[in-house]
Every structure is written in C-alpha cells, then in structure tokens.
Image (cartoon, rainbow, N blue to C red):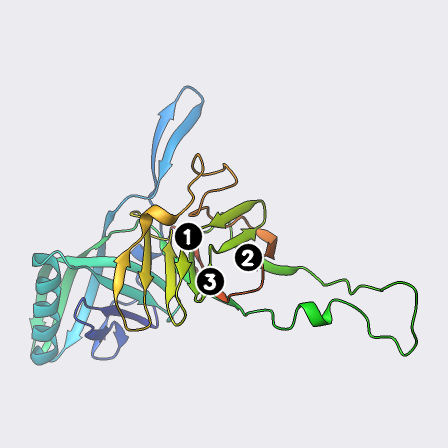
Amino acid sequence: MHKLKYVSSRGNIFELDVPEASIGTGTSLRGYKPGYTLGTRSVSGISSNAQEVPLDLFVEGFELAEKMSQEFEFDFNKQQPGELVFNNEWRQRAYIAKSDVQSVFHDQASVALTAILLDGAWHKSHVKSFDIVRDEAQSDWLNLPTNTPYNLGITRPPKQLEIQALSECPVKLVIYGAALQPRIVIGDNTYSFTLTVPAGGRLVVDGTKARKAITLVTETGDVSDRFDVGNRGSGKGSGNYCFEPLKTGYQNISWDGTFGFDIEWWETRGGLPWNS
C-alpha cells in the first residue's frame, strides 16, 4: 500500500505509507463487501454498507504513536469521522475505532487497528466547468462579405460530458449567480430550480451524500437551506429529478448560457484499485 493517509476531522494528516508509520500492503482495503439479500435464483437489495476492516500498523516513535492514538480517539468519541485518502484521488469517510498493541520493541510498535469504512465504497471526484456563453445573439449568423437575401446560421456543437465509470455517478452542481430560474439539461434529465441566484452568490446542489442538500451561499457568505427550490419530479428516473445521478458514456449538456456552473461527479467502487 502506498500514498495512503488519514485526514482527521480537525484536518490533521497522518501518512500511513512512510517508514515511521506503515500499514504495509493494506490488502483489506482492496476488497469489497456489499450488502444484499438472496432469493430464489436471484439477488436483491444490493447496497454499500459501512464495514469494519483490519489494518496492521507499524509505527516508530512514541510521540507519533501518541498523536495518532489521540486523534483516532477524538474522531470516534466525538462521532466526527475522518477520511482515508488513497493516492490523493480515492476517498472514504472512516473511523479508526479500535487499537490493539501487538508488540513493542524500543520505540517501535506493531498495532492492530480496526477501521470502520462508513460509506461502504470509495469515491473519486471529477469536476468540469461550464462558463457563460457571451455575445450569443451577435454570433449566431455568418458574416459574409456580400449581401444575400437570406441568413446563414452557425451550427453550434453541443456541449458534452464524458462519464468514464463502471456505473452511474452521484452528482453535485454549483450554479453561479446571477442566474434566474436556472435550468440545466444533462442527457435525458432536467435539473431545474425555482429561485434567482444573486450576483456573486452560488447555489450548491449536492446529490453525492446519503442526505441530499440544496444550499444558497450569498456573496457576503450568508448560507441558507433552499431544499424547497429543487424540482424533484417523481424521483429518480423521472426525467426531472434535481439529484439524478449521471449515466456513463457521453452526455449532451444544454442551458440558456446566461450563467456558469460546475458539475462534480463521483466515480465509485467497492475496493481500492489494484493497478495503483
């Protein structure tokens, strides 16, 4: 295992792949254990559940061991999860819930840790930004050197997003003001909101968490819950669901061009990749 670190709820970082502190190959993090229900020649209720995994930690230096122990205990006792981060790409909320010292030699110790992986899956974030389309009205027609009795229009290529993942991806939108009744079409789903995002502000539509959220942040930093402004249609798959996950492959994107926005999507998988 390389390039793995634990980031505590207070932002303290502990590297877990350095000579002073190492979990070795970390094989337990590469497996996956989804929840499911077996039926007659079938399986149903597949879900990503929190799970316990063992980690064997070698640590050198009692001062470092004490700092790690205190931080692990703080997060768990306060119920404020930290995060395991692999290769600065794959992330998962986690607790280090148990610590069992196996041996001590001089200032070196072997410790059996029990990590609780809260999300049941690792996620890798991808972001793409779309800017305001300026001077749209003035550039819709070809400017020919001679007059003609008709206008020749410009064919604009559609905006596209490529989702390279094994399955659909949870999505987070950040819409920048000013935006009047913002509406974005991605693939076959429309993401629409019944409010005006003020100039300098932003609307954050977060479908990446178990608890969905829509938050308005003003230019001065005031934050308000605006879950009520999201069009949720009749739920996932209805074509008008503001938290609709993104499908894999190429997705066409359209909007009126009067505002800019970011699309963040989470590529997810049960275990860490073997090829990194």
The image quarter containing residue 148 is bottom right
Question: Where is 127 relative to 234, above or below?
Answer: below
Q: Which mark is residue 164?
A: 2
- Spot occupied by residue 120 in the image (x, y as percentages of width and height): 31, 49
Question: Where is 263 relative to 212, above or below?
Answer: below
**Disc 2 versus disc 3: distance between alpha carbons?**
30 Å
Left or right of 138? Residue 111 is: left
Left or right of 155? Residue 75 is: left
- In terms of sequence position, does the residue under pointer 3 or pointer 1 come before the other? 3
**Disc 2 versus disc 1: distance between alpha carbons?**
13 Å
Q: Residues within 10 Å of mark 3 (few under 14, many from 20)?
A: many
- Spot occupied by residue 143 in the image (x, y as percentages of width and height): 82, 75
Please identify the quadrant where the N terminus is shown.
bottom left
Label 2 amino acid? Answer: Gln
- The structure residue drawn at horizontal position 27% and vertical position 64%, both measured from the top left corner, is 84
- The structure residue drawn at horizontal position 39% and vertical position 29%, both measured from the top left corner, is 44
- In terms of sequence position, does the residue under pointer 2 or pointer 3 come before the other? 2
Query: What SS does tag 3 mark?
Result: strand
- The structure residue drawn at horizontal position 49% and vertical position 42%, both measured from the top left corner, is 240
Q: Are marks 3 and 1 in contact (CB under 8 Å)?
A: no
